[in-house]
Amino acid sequence: REMLFRSPVMAEAIGGVILFDETLRQKSSDGDYLRNVILDHGSLPGIKVDQGVKEFEGGSDEKITTGLDGLHERCQEYEKLGAKFTKWRAVINVSDEIPSSNCISENMNALAEYALIAQQNNMVPIVEPEVIMDGSHSVERCHEVTNQTLLVLFEMLDKKNVNIKGTLLKPNMVVSGTENNYKAPIEEVAEKTLQCLRSSVPDELPGIVFLSGGQSDEDATAHLNAMNQILGENKPWNLSFSYGRALQQPALKAWQGKNENTSRAQEAFLKRAKLNSLATLGKYSTDQE
C-alpha cells in the first residue's frame, strides 16, 4: 500500500483512495499514518463502510449488504480520523430468475440510507450498485437489470433527501456475463452503459466513477475511453474510474513483495493510472499500451 501511495502519479491521476478500517489506522514505515501519506501525495483518503453481504432470502443466490447498525457512530469516528468520502457496495447477482424487485429495492434503500448518514457526517458518499458480471447472462440482460437498479437507486436517494450534488455513483458497465459465448465489443458496451445512465441518472450528479468488476486492465480502460469519446464535451457528468484490480494488478505483478522491485512496480502503476486518466478525456488508444 505504501509503495502505491508514495508513487509520484498519485497527484497527477488518482483523486482518492478507498481504504478499509484497518488501513485508515495503519502507519507507514516512517511512522506516519497512511492517510497522511495519501494526503501528502495529492490525493484524498476515503473509507469503505459497509460490512459485507449476507444471503437475502433462504436458499436464493441474492445478497443484501449489511452495516447500517452503528453506521452513524462509525462515520463520526472516520470523519475525525480524516476520511473525506465513504463507499458502500450493493451486490446484484443476475440470472433469468433473479434479481427480484424486492432484492433490488432493499439494497437500494440501504444505499440511500447509508448515503444520508455519510452526508450528515460531512463525508461524500459513493453509492456502488454492482450488477455482477459472473454468469451466462447476455449483455441485454445486464442492460435490463442495470437500468432497473439505477432507476430504483435514484428514486430512493430522492426519497431520503440525499444531496445528489454531493454524491458520486460507482456503477458497473453493461457487459456480457463471463460465461456467455458472446462478448459485447467495446462500442456496444459503451453505448449500452450510456443508455442506462441517460435514462436514470440526474444531470446534477457531479461524477460517475466506474468499477472494473473483473474486466481486464485494457478492457476497463477502453470502455471508459469509448464512453467519454461518445459524450464528447457536452457530457452531463464527469466519467472517471474507481478501479481495484484493473489498476493495481500490473504493479503487484511487478513488485512481488520485494523492495528491489519498488521502482518497477511504481512504473507499472504510473502507466496504468496515466492510461486511465487519458481515458477520462477520451484520449486513450491501444497503441499506448
Image (cartoon, grey):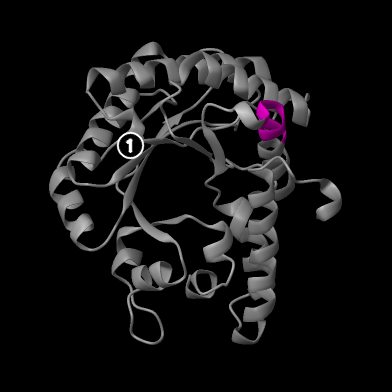
Q: Residue at x 35, y 66 (%)?
A: 23
Q: Is residue 227 magenta?
A: yes
Report x, y in % for residue 150: 45, 20
Quadrant of residue 18 in the image? bottom left
Quadrant of residue 211 in the image? top right
Q: Residue at x 24, y 17 (%)?
A: 159
Q: Residue furthest right?
A: 287
Q: Residue furthest front?
A: 233
Q: Residue at x 64, y 65 (%)?
A: 269
Q: Is residue 130 visible?
A: yes
- The stretch in magenta equals 226-232
Per the image, label 1 sits on a secondary structure element best described as helix
Q: Please state which amino acid type lies under the numbered disc 1.
A: Gly
As rendered, which of 14 and 144 lies closer to the eye? 14
Report x, y in % for residue 178: 67, 32
Magenta residues, dominant SS class: helix
Residue beneath disc 1: 166
As rendered, which of 286 and 234 lies closer to the eye? 234
Position of 66 with respect to 197 (left or right) is left
As rendered, which of 93 and 234 lies closer to the eye? 234
As rendered, which of 66 and 124 lies closer to the eye? 124
